[in-house]
């Protein structure tokens, strides 16, 4: 009898864990609250009747009831360090440059980043032993925290056993997700804004204690000596870092893989986390700025964005400076508020062409600094908040540095306020502004626009584009400031005699720079297309496009429909390319490149003869990792020479993944999709086998 009751208890626990996972992690419950409650009460009754079967990872432990006299101290397995701060996009670019200076050229080619919200809650450290939650602690002073295990057990989004509720997560790749012998993770306990408001209102109605903000509420809720009080609070968690991992079947090699691994175990991992390559750093900054603009719409509070180098090996190599890791930085917002008058709205054009409305304010003190200008993010932000010229507005300093208008004080309006509209043309170059369908940002897509020029030049000369040695941000900034560069093509018309007269530019340095510029003229047209900075067009997309078109001139005449038919392009990229070349200044820019001798036409592809060996005909490859003897471009050329096609991402249509050392998430995805994985030797073997078969025939 006892055995059957134990089986029933275990069955109920498994079911309830699954239902809790569906409700609290997936936000997709498969049973009603009433059905859950019936099963929960049955489990409670059975555990009360058979206390010998009680387990600290049972769903019934969520209700709390443990009373602590005080919190014991617990030593963290490693210091819980803070992060260095960035208070604007320029700081992010500067951080990137510091990171790249410490890495080899080979590492820089593989450099990628992961960004995640900087959650405004209470840092917690969760310990698991053989798949069971064993200890939970606060961050404390970074070295020693407080043991709040009993309170953390009441938080429904924290799995008490891992892997957790696999049946509720059938789409997750659970290969290798058996419980590790030891796992320690870092995360953030928080309370949703709506739940916080509801709780505070109930407290106010009952004349109870209210809290100032969700962060204080979360921290106070987890530092209750009576865990049943914690259980009555709407606490949640996000998990975002593996601190210790032992006894796992496979170990992640990147932060992105670590997050995927945690998710496969049933851990709560935020959906706003994203991955970017180094060549897409501009897009990453845009993404961060957009996330900051919409943070008020997120259900939880964030006070910034954390950017991390993705590779764990690179993280180890970069190390720390003082108390801050070199491989991560916190982009911060939020700050003190003040009220002042909005005098005017003007627009600024950033390096990517994104147009940002800015408020001109009556001077006001915010966090001890006089503020006269503040960001308004985008057109929708102004319209949704109904911000008008002449309004009294609330201003804050995001991250205690960047001022922004939070909202208008509509109660103070007198009828003289003016509704603002986005102007139709760029104030810097008078070209029409463009707002892509479905996006919040408006753009100037004229590459010759002065406001965009310095960053465009830096990107154009970078390794992933035209690869001009000795040419970087400092040169871009100086030459634009001196008036030597007024558009990208001016790089090939630089006045070298005048540059020789500049401080720090001696003859040898100038000659090396000149030779680098000359050599870049022979780069293939795909590199030029990459360097133009067209939205959504990185190196992989540029190569895909130029594999189809004979010259940039042909591409300039392409239609959206034609481009969208290319694999991995689609209508969004196609629209961006067509809109770029529709502008007269951009077309004139390409003519100027051609006149300077820059290659606009690719090498003709030889038509395969009747007897040519094409073992990879109609086969699609993806390349990842570091190959023993070939660079990625060499491998791509080798595959294409034998009839194959190379794309940038793994999908069900991929035939082969060519994998070298440190193959990351692409390898995991390929294995999950059943894509054939080959090494460099095996790739050569495929060709040799085909050659042997051809000779025999």
Image: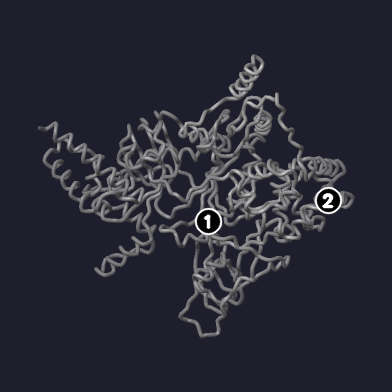
Residue 305 x/y as whole percent: 51, 52
Q: Is residue 63 above or below residue 397?
A: above
How far separated are the C-alphas under marks 2 and 1? Answer: 37 Å
In the shown orientation, is residue 148 left or right of residue 495? Answer: left
The x, y position of residue 136, in whole percent, is 34, 43
Callout 1 environment at 10 Å: few (<14), some (14 to 19), or many (20+)? many
Query: Where does residue 473 sit, x and y in percent of width and height?
Result: 72, 49
In the displayed structure image, the side of residue 191 where residue 425 appears, left or right = right
> SS class of the residue under badge 2?
loop
Mark 2 is surrounded, within 10 Å at the Cα level, by few (under 14), some (14 to 19) or many (20 or more) other residues, namely few
Residue 97 lies in quadrant:
top right
Q: Quadrant of the N terminus?
A: top left
Q: Which mark is residue 503?
A: 2
Please say whether residue 472 is visible from this viewpoint: no
Decide which of 650, 565 is in the foreground and name it. 565
Q: Earlier in the sequence, mark 2 or mark 1?
A: 1
Disc number for residue 332: 1
- What residue is at 48 percent from the left and 81 percent from the top? 412
């Amino acid at each position: 009898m006892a055995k059957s009751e134990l089986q029933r208890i275990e069955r109920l626990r498994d079911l309830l864990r699954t239902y809790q996972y569906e409700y609290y992690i997936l936000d997709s419950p498969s049973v009603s609250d009433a059905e859950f409650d019936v099963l929960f009460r049955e489990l409670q009754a059975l555990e009360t009747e058979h206390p010998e079967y009680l387990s600290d990872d049972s769903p019934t432990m969520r209700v709390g009831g443990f009373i602590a006299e005080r919190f014991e101290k617990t030593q963290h397995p490693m210091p819980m360090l803070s992060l260095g701060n960035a208070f604007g996009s320029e700081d992010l670019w500067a951080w990137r440059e510091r990171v790249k200076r410490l890495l080899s050229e080979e590492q820089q080619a593989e450099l990628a980043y992961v960004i995640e919200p900087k959650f405004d809650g209470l840092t917690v450290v969760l310990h698991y032993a053989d798949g069971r939650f064993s200890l939970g602690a606060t961050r404390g002073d970074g070295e020693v925290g407080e043991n709040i295990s009993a309170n953390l057990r009441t938080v429904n989004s924290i799995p008490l056993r891992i892997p957790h509720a696999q049946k509720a997560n059938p789409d997750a790749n659970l290969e290798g997700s058996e419980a590790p012998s030891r796992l320690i993770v870092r995360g953030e306990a928080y309370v949703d804004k709506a739940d916080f408001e509801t709780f505070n209102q109930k407290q106010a109605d009952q004349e109870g204690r209210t809290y100032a903000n969700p962060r204080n509420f979360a921290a106070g809720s987890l530092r209750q000596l009576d865990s049943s009080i914690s259980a009555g609070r709407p606490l949640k968690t996000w998990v975002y870092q593996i601190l210790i991992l032992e006894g796992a079947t496979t170990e992640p090699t990147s932060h992105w893989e670590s997050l995927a691994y945690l998710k496969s175990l049933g851990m709560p991992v935020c959906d706003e986390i994203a991955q970017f390559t180094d060549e897409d750093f501009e897009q990453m900054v845009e993404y961060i700025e957009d996330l900051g603009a919409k943070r008020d719409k997120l259900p939880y509070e964030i006070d910034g964005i954390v950017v991390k180098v993705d590779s764990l090996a690179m993280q180890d190599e970069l190390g720390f400076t003082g108390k801050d890791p070199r491989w991560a930085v916190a982009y911060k917002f939020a700050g003190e508020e003040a009220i002042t008058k909005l005098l005017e709205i003007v627009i600024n054009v950033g390096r990517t062409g994104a147009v940002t409305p800015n408020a001109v304010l009556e001077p006001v003190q915010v966090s001890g600094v006089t503020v006269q200008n503040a960001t308004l993010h985008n057109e929708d932000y102004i319209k949704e908040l109904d911000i008008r010229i002449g309004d009294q507005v609330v201003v804050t300093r995001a991250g205690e540095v960047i001022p922004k208008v939070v909202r208008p004080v509509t109660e103070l309006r007198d009828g003289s306020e003016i509704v603002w509209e986005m102007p139709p043309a760029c104030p810097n170059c008078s070209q029409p502004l463009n707002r892509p369908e479905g996006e919040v940002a408006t753009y100037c897509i004229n590459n010759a626009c002065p406001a965009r020029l310095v960053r465009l030049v830096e990107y154009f000369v970078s390794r992933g584009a035209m690869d001009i040695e000795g040419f970087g941000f400092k040169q871009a900034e100086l030459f634009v400031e001196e008036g030597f560069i007024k558009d990208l093509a001016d790089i090939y018309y630089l006045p070298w005699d005048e540059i020789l007269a500049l401080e720090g530019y001696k003859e040898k340095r100038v000659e090396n720079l000149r030779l680098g510029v000359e050599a870049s003229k022979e780069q293939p047209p795909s590199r030029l297309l990459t360097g133009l900075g067209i939205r959504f067009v990185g190196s992989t997309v540029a190569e895909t496009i130029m594999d189809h078109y004979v010259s940039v001139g042909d591409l300039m005449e392409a239609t959206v429909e034609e481009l969208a038919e290319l694999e991995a392009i689609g209508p969004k990229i196609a629209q961006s390319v067509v809109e770029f070349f529709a502008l007269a200044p951009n077309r004139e820019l390409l003519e100027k490149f051609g006149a300077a001798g820059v290659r606009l036409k690719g090498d003709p592809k030889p038509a395969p003869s009747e007897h040519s060996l094409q073992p990879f005909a109609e086969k699609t490859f993806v390349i990842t990792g570091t190959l023993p003897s070939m660079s990625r471009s060499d491998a791509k050329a080798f595959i294409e020479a034998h009839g194959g096609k190379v794309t940038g991402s793994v999908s069900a249509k991929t035939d082969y993944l060519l994998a070298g050392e440190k193959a990351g998430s692409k390898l995991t995805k390929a294995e999950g999709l059943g894509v054939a994985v080959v090494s460099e030797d095996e790739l050569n073997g495929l060709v040799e086998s085909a050659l042997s078969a051809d000779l025999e025939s």
